[in-house]
Amino acid sequence: MEESTSKEKVLKNIRNALINVADNPFPHVDFSSPIYHEMEDTLDISFAQEFTRVGGKFVFCENEPEFVETFRLLARQNDWPEAFCLDEQITALLSKGGVKLASDPESFTKQKVGITSCEYLIARLGSIMVSSKTTSGRRMNVFPEVHVVVAYTSQLVPDLKQAFAHITNKYGKKLPSMVTVITGPSRTADIEKTLVMGAHGPKELYLFLIDMDV
């Protein structure tokens, strides 16, 4: 009975609050101005600093041929026999450089390395915005042990606000069913407060930033 009475009191207070709408006590608050200070460094430097701070591995490339050569060396050093990639543009670049790639869905679960594109890079956070609208879809961002992201400097934005504005302009009313932000490789400390990498996704996250517009 007491529980019912308490519930009725709460609902009554809610009804009264909806009926008797109070005036905004802070009518002059500016909600449109930026809440952050301007970044002192350029977007690429700011992104690189924040991205590496959260455990990401950043590689800057002056052009696409340099990206291909650098990735080929990285694959050789880490003993990656092949990588899984569904993005046609990235596949075309790496295939010309002699990089062995796989794209057969049946071999996906056996792949250690997955290569994807992204939507935008958020400089202030060192984060990567991805969506289900890219060729790679949803699972490529979370399943492989090593996630390699290829992006261009034209995809850099200062903050989340600009990233959401751009993705809204890009897709209009047909927004992706999934838009998410990746900040560093997967990690957890739920078990005995011990940090474990790769608990819910990739253990390693690489970002190749190519100095070009796309």
Image: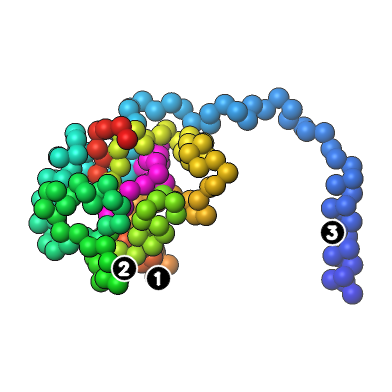
**Horizontal and vertical percent position of residue 8:** 89, 63
| Mark with earlier residue (1, 2) | 2
The disc labelled 1 sits on which kind of residue? Ile
Q: Residue at x 30, y 42 (%)?
A: 151
Q: Earlier in the sequence, mark 1 or mark 3?
A: 3
Tell me: residue 89, above or below residue 78. Answer: above
Furthest toward the bottom, the residue is 1
In reply to whether residue 121 is colored magenta, the answer given is: yes
- Which residue range is magenta in the image? 115-129
Closer to the camera: disc 2 or disc 3?
A: 2
Q: Residue at x 67, y 27 (%)?
A: 29
Real-space Cα distance between discs 2 and 3? Answer: 54 Å
Q: How many marks?
A: 3
Please state which amino acid type lies under the numbered disc 2.
Answer: Pro
Q: Quadrant of residue 70?
A: top left
- One can see residue 53 in this view: no
Q: Residues within 10 Å of mark 1 (few under 14, many from 20)?
A: few
Residue 15 is left or right of residue 197, and the answer is right
At numbered mark 2, what does the secondary structure look like: helix, strand or loop?
A: helix
1 and 2 marks in contact (CB < 8 Å)? no
Pointer 3 residue: 10
| Quadrant hosting residue 119 | top left
Depth check: give the residue in front, 147 or 199.
Answer: 147
The kind of residue on which mark 3 rests is Val
Dot placed on the residue nearer the N-terminal end, 2 or 3: 3
Q: Which residue is mark 2?
A: 105
**Is residue 28 shown to the viewer in this render?**
yes
For the N terminus, the quadrant is: bottom right
Give the residue number, with chain letter if any, for mark 1. 191
Residue at 28% in and 51% down: 88
Q: Residues within 10 Å of mark 2 (few under 14, many from 20)?
A: few
Q: Is residue 46 magenta?
A: no
